Image (spheres, rainbow, N blue to C red):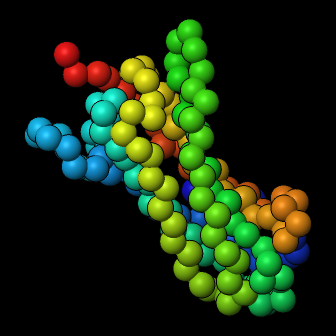
């Protein structure tokens, strides 16, 4: 995961790139692959979920407000004549403990995406208690996928 933070010096708040963004096709009738990290094809009527894991460490971590929230969002850019309005997200509470490992899952229900080729990107941001973004961000390119409809 590519990350950037400008809250303080690198040693006082370190937002590590130790992130895991994987997708797994949820079970459906048929011989579909369950792991989409290698397979890039999914049927419209199948659901997906995305797993995320990241860490922050440093002396500044315990001093930040417990009201802060992480927000993870997955964007789907559809290639061709139309764009996708689908952008699922999840919010995770900030834990003021250096080295804490965060984990989150975003579920994308079946029939959320129409047939087409999509470029998928996951974005991670930190927000203060009032909802304003802080200068901490990361993203992961998940690649292109073909979503198709069974005949």
82 with respect to 12 (left or right): left
Q: Position of residue 144 (x, y in %)?
A: 44, 31
Question: Is 103 situated above or below 3?
Answer: below
Residue 68, picture quadrant: bottom right
The residue located at (39%, 21%) in the rendering is: 115
Where's the C terminus, which quadrant? top left
**In the image shown, does 125 or 88 lie closer to the viewer?**
88
Front residue (pair 8, 94): 94
Any part of residue 135 in sight: no
Q: Give the percent coordinates (x, y) of residue 148.
A: 31, 23
Specify whether 57 is left or right of 112.
right
Is residue 148 found left or right of 15 in the rendered image? left
Residue 52 coordinates in the image, percent (x, y): 50, 62
**Who's the residue at 44% across and 46% down the image?**
108
Q: Which image quadrant is residue 30 in?
A: top left
Viewer can see residue 79: yes
Residue 80 lies, with reference to residue 71, above or below; the image says above
| Residue projecting furthest to the top | 81
Residue closest to the far left:
31
Q: Return the residue nearer the eye: 81 or 12.
A: 81
- Name the residue: 56% across, 9% down: 81
- In the depicted structure, whether residue 50 falls above or below residue 85: below
């Amino acid at each position: 995961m590519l990350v950037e933070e400008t809250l303080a010096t690198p040693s006082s708040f370190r937002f590590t790139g130790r992130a895991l963004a994987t997708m797994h096709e949820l079970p459906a009738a048929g011989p579909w692959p369950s792991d989409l990290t290698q397979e890039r094809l999914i049927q419209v009527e199948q659901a997906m979920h995305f797993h995320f894991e990241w860490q922050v460490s440093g002396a500044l971590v315990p001093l930040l407000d417990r009201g802060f929230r992480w927000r993870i969002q997955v964007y789907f850019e559809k290639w061709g004549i139309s764009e996708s309005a689908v952008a699922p997200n999840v919010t995770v509470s900030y834990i003021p403990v250096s080295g804490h490992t965060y984990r989150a899952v975003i579920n994308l229900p079946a029939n959320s995406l129409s047939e087409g080729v999509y470029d998928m990107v996951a974005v991670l941001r930190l927000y203060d208690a009032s909802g304003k973004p802080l200068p901490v961000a990361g993203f992961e390119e998940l690649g292109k996928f073909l979503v198709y409809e069974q005949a």
